[in-house]
């Protein structure tokens, strides 16, 4: 399973999102939406082994989390405004209590809480805080295989589907620095010394996992 947690330091957490001002009045909601799309979408479908949790810290009211699950989600299209419309519907509802995930629509869940709760919920995952200044995410002299060998993937039969392979969670910030209380179960890793936009960093993580590059975990 591939998990992505995105921190939106100023992202609105309740009320009416200004759909014409996602970058300004909505508190860089545009950044979160691009991260959501990069986490869950391929060229013509959803990544069924991925989920994303958007962390909305900009108020008004308590911090809030929206979880979107790739193998359940419906009604989301690869277009920022349409995703913003889905988020906007959720933000009109009151924020649920911390840790209580309320289903708002197919594949979209809503809860109170902050990154500490997400880290606790990810206790079975290897957790990576993405940071350009850290050690690389791949091992020294790693090879890029010439045939894709995904490190996480979905398997299906007539009755069910399963996610196999590694369970890994990445934490990214918006345009502001990521400040976390680092504990033993979180490591910082870099995908290169240049700071990229969050959605590009997510695309590179998917590339490494899709191709089966040996990771430095
Ligand atoms: C636009 S960057 C944030 C830049 C911000 N000024 C800072 O100092 O953190 C958004 C997020 O993408 C991830 N990111 C961007 N470039 C990266 C890199 N080269 N290596 C690892 N993570 C990166 C980080 O998680 C970062 O918080």
Image: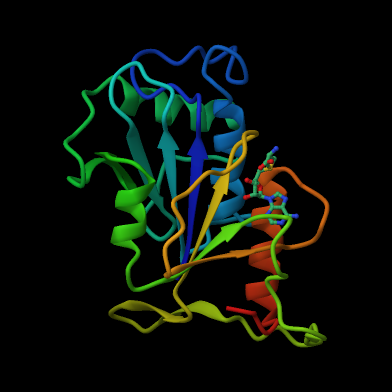
On the image, which quarter does residue 164 sit in?
bottom left
Counting from the top left corner in percent of width and height, residue 122 is at 35, 64
Q: How is the image coloured?
A: rainbow
Front position in the image: 3 or 48: 3
Please indicate whether residue 215 sits to the left or right of residue 10 in the image. right
Which residue is found at the position 60% from the left and 41% from the top?
78
Q: Is residue 43 visible?
A: no
Relative to 32, is 70 above or below? below
Relative to 94, is 121 above or below? below
On the image, which quarter does residue 66 sit in?
top left
Front position in the image: 59 or 210: 59
Please indicate whether residue 152 sits to the left or right of residue 130 in the image. left
Q: Is residue 21 visible?
A: yes
Relative to 211, is 75 above or below? above
Please indicate whether residue 139 sits to the left or right of residue 114 in the image. right
Front position in the image: 156 or 188: 188
> Split into 4 quadrants, where in the image is the N terminus?
bottom left
Which residue is found at the position 46% from the left and 58% from the top?
182
Q: How many marks?
A: 0
> Split into 4 quadrants, where in the image is the C terminus?
bottom right
Counting from the top left corner in percent of width and height, residue 19 is at 53, 15
Which residue is found at the position 50% from the left and 33% from the top?
8
Please indicate whether residue 193 sits to the left or right of residue 83 in the image. right
Which residue is found at the position 67% from the left and 82% from the top?
212
Counting from the top left corner in percent of width and height, residue 5 is at 47, 50
Counting from the top left corner in percent of width and height, residue 137 is at 68, 71
């Amino acid at each position: 399973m591939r998990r992505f947690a995105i921190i939106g330091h100023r992202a609105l957490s309740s009320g009416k999102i200004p759909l014409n001002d996602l970058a300004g009045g909505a508190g860089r909601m545009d950044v979160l939406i691009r991260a959501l799309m990069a986490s869950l979408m391929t060229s013509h479908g959803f990544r069924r082994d991925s989920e994303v949790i958007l962390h909305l810290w900009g108020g008004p009211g308590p911090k809030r989390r929206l979880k979107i699950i790739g193998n359940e989600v419906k009604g989301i299209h690869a277009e920022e405004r349409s995703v913003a419309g889905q988020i906007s519907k959720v933000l009109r509802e009151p924020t649920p209590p911390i840790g209580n995930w309320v289903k708002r629509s197919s594949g979209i869940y809503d809860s109170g809480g902050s990154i500490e709760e997400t880290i606790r919920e990810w206790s079975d995952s290897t957790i990576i805080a993405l940071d350009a200044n850290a050690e690389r995410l791949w091992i020294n002299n790693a090879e890029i295989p010439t045939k894709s060998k995904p490190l996480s993937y979905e398997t299906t039969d007539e009755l069910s589907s399963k996610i196999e392979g590694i369970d890994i969670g990445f934490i990214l910030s918006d345009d502001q620095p990521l400040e976390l209380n680092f504990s033993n179960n979180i490591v910082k890793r870099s995908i290169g010394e240049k700071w990229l936009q969050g959605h590009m960093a997510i695309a590179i993580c998917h590339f490494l996992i899709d191709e089966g590059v040996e990771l430095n975990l």
